[in-house]
Image (cartoon, rainbow, N blue to C red):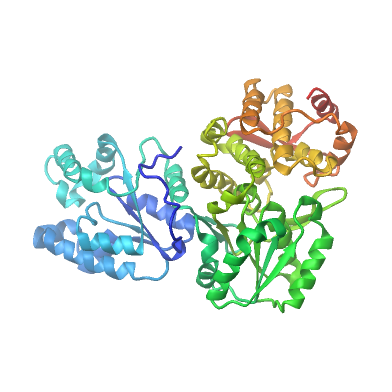
């Protein structure tokens, strides 16, 4: 799935990635400076190009300094500045020179203070990138192709020590995205000041450290349900206590049927009893229902207190915790009351999936499949694989990235974010009419299939797309046939109250092909009825 030579490291004690630097390394011409600038911008981090810092320090070009002082003098200055730059407590993106880590002391510094990503390309690509500026590269003077070839041979085993991203054939956006997926580090901008999203095993056990690093204040109310609480409440609370936070536990009943304003009113009462103030923080520990509801309670209590999403289900990780949508259901429909209220951060610990029942893993895979249909043939391929469960560690940040890219473009659903409603117009209606006996993922997966059939009937896609979705649902063991017990008239009636209505009409997100979904499509109720009846 990924173009990295090394797998993502998800074991062991989680590192506070927001305080660690991201070092981009690799041979001349691999794009470290250009990619580093874009990566820093997307992660809302400072960017440092160490070669530029060296030139400022020596007050001349690196080429001239090499000629006058030699490589040893240059490496000494490089080491000095690397030590100084790396001591900054705020995580930065740092572009290193092509030989910056040849020295053991330099390697020790970067491995202690951050994560290294080595960018690599084939010989022709590197040569093309540097041939117009070879005079600036003192180790490539003379016959450029010959010197570059020699340098790559000399350093081949050296570069192979580090996690390597092969950039040939990738756009700059794809390279930046792959790095974020590999590191499990994202930043969602566009909603207020934005917020970081962290993906790594063990994060729950370090919640207190992350709260401190983000400057969040107590008292803290951990909102969870009976199912999740027995696994993760104690470790989360202990972490916050170690960090000096006063913590109150608030346990709510599990299940979509309890995602109501009545439960939220109980949460408000609990927050008051716990002494929460405007500067306090709510931690939502659970699946999508829990994060939706606790986030809404936080958004309305005292006109808004800070909250943190800590999703523990696959569905919560790849969908519900991202994007700042909070809310509750009414008897007439799902999520009809709510707000856009982003968390201060998202802590996603894939280790939580170890306790998740297989039926809930399948439930979450419906949203993974949706992200694949919207933007990624690779995700769809994984959903069609018999080994999808074994791919989950890699699949989670990849699916999250798909949604995050949409959120960055349209955080408040004024346009493109509506593609994320794929499968939800019919799916939400099925879920409600079933009285939530069909799980969210089951209903959304079936909704995607039915909406793909609508797309085919309206000429937006060919017949292979609904078949691909059907095969993916079969592979994941999700339903692909509408239960006979569900009344079609009731489904159509619920759709008429869908929150995505505009100008009095129901709007659909419809797939054209894998990687292309349009939004705002008007579909006649007669066609929807025909599709439902034939399913």
Please report the residue visible at 60 percent of the width from the left and 65 percent of the height from the top. Answer: 344
404 w.r.t. 278: above or below: above
- x and y percent of residue 516 in the render? 60, 33
**Whether residue 204 is visible:** yes
- x and y percent of residue 499 in the render? 80, 47
**Between 521 and 17, which is closer to the camera in this rendering?**
17
- Quadrant where the C terminus sits is top right
Please report the residue visible at 14 percent of the width from the left and 61 percent of the height from the top. Answer: 65
**Between 346 and 194, which is closer to the camera in this rendering?**
346
Considering every residue shown, the one lying at the far top of the view is: 463
- x and y percent of residue 350 in the render? 54, 51
**Whether residue 59 is visible:** no
287 w.r.t. 472: above or below: below
Please report the residue visible at 72 percent of the width from the left and 29 percent of the height from the top. Answer: 480
Q: Quadrant of residue 533?
A: top right
Q: Quadrant of residue 106?
A: bottom left
Q: Total marks drawn?
A: 0
Q: Quadrant of residue 280?
A: bottom right
**Between 500 and 395, which is closer to the camera in this rendering?**
395
- x and y percent of residue 483 in the render? 81, 31
404 w.r.t. 495: above or below: below
Tell whether 69 sits left or right of 422: left
Tell whether 505 sits left or right of 453: right
């Amino acid at each position: 799935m990924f173009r990295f030579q090394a797998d993502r490291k998800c074991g062991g004690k989680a590192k506070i990635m927001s305080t660690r630097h991201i070092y981009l390394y690799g041979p001349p011409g691999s794009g470290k400076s250009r990619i580093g600038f874009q990566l820093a911008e997307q992660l809302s981090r400072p960017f440092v190009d160490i070669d530029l810092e060296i030139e400022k320090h020596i007050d001349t070009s690196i080429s001239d300094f090499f000629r006058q002082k030699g490589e040893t003098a240059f490496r000494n200055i490089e080491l000095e500045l690397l030590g100084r730059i790396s001591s900054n407590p705020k995580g930065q993106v740092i572009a290193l020179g092509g030989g910056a880590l040849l020295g053991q002391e330099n390697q020790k510094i970067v491995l202690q203070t951050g994560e290294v990503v080595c960018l690599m390309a084939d010989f022709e690509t590197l040569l093309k990138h540097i041939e117009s500026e070879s005079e600036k590269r003192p180790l490539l003077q003379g016959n450029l192709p010959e010197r570059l070839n020699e340098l790559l041979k000399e350093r081949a085993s050296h570069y192979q020590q580090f996690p390597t991203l092969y950039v040939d054939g990738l756009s700059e956006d794809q390279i930046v995205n792959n790095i974020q997926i590999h590191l499990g580090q994202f930043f969602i901008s566009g909603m207020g000041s934005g917020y970081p999203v962290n993906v790594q095993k063990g994060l729950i056990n370090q919640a207190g450290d992350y709260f401190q690093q983000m400057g969040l204040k107590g008292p803290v109310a951990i909102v969870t349900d009976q199912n999740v609480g027995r696994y993760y409440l104690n470790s989360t609370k202990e972490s916050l206590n170690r960090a000096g936070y006063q913590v109150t536990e608030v346990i709510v009943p599990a299940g979509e049927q309890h995602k109501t304003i009545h439960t939220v009113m109980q949460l408000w009462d609990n927050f008051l009893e716990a002494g929460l103030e405007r500067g306090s923080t709510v931690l939502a520990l659970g699946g999508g229902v829990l994060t939706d509801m606790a986030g809404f309670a936080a958004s309305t209590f005292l006109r808004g207190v800070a909250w943190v999403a800590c999703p523990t289900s696959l569905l919560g990780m790849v969908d519900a915790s991202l994007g700042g949508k909070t809310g509750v259901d009414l008897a007439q429909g799902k999520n009809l009351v709510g707000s856009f209220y982003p968390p201060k951060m998202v802590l996603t610990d894939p280790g939580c999936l170890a306790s998740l029942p297989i039926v809930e893993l399948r439930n979450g895979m419906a949203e993974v499949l949706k992200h694949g249909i919207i933007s990624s043939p690779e995700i769809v391929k994984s959903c069609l694989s018999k080994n999808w469960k074994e791919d989950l560690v890699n699949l989670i940040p990849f699916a999250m990235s798909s949604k995050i890219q949409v959120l960055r473009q349209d955080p408040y659903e004024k346009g493109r974010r509506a593609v994320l409603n794929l499968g939800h117009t019919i799916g939400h209606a099925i879920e409600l009419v079933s009285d939530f006996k069909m799980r969210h993922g089951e209903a959304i997966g079936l909704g995607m299939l039915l909406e793909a059939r609508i797309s085919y009937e309206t000429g937006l896609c060919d017949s292979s797309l609904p078949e691909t979705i059907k095969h993916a649902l079969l592979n994941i063991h999700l339903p692909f046939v509408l239960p006979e017990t569900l009344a079609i008239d009731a489904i159509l009636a619920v759709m008429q109250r869908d929150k995505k209505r505009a100008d009095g009409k129901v709007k659909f997100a419809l797939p054209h092909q894998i990687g292309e979904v349009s939004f705002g499509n008007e579909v006649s109720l007669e066609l929807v009825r025909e599709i439902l009846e034939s399913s």
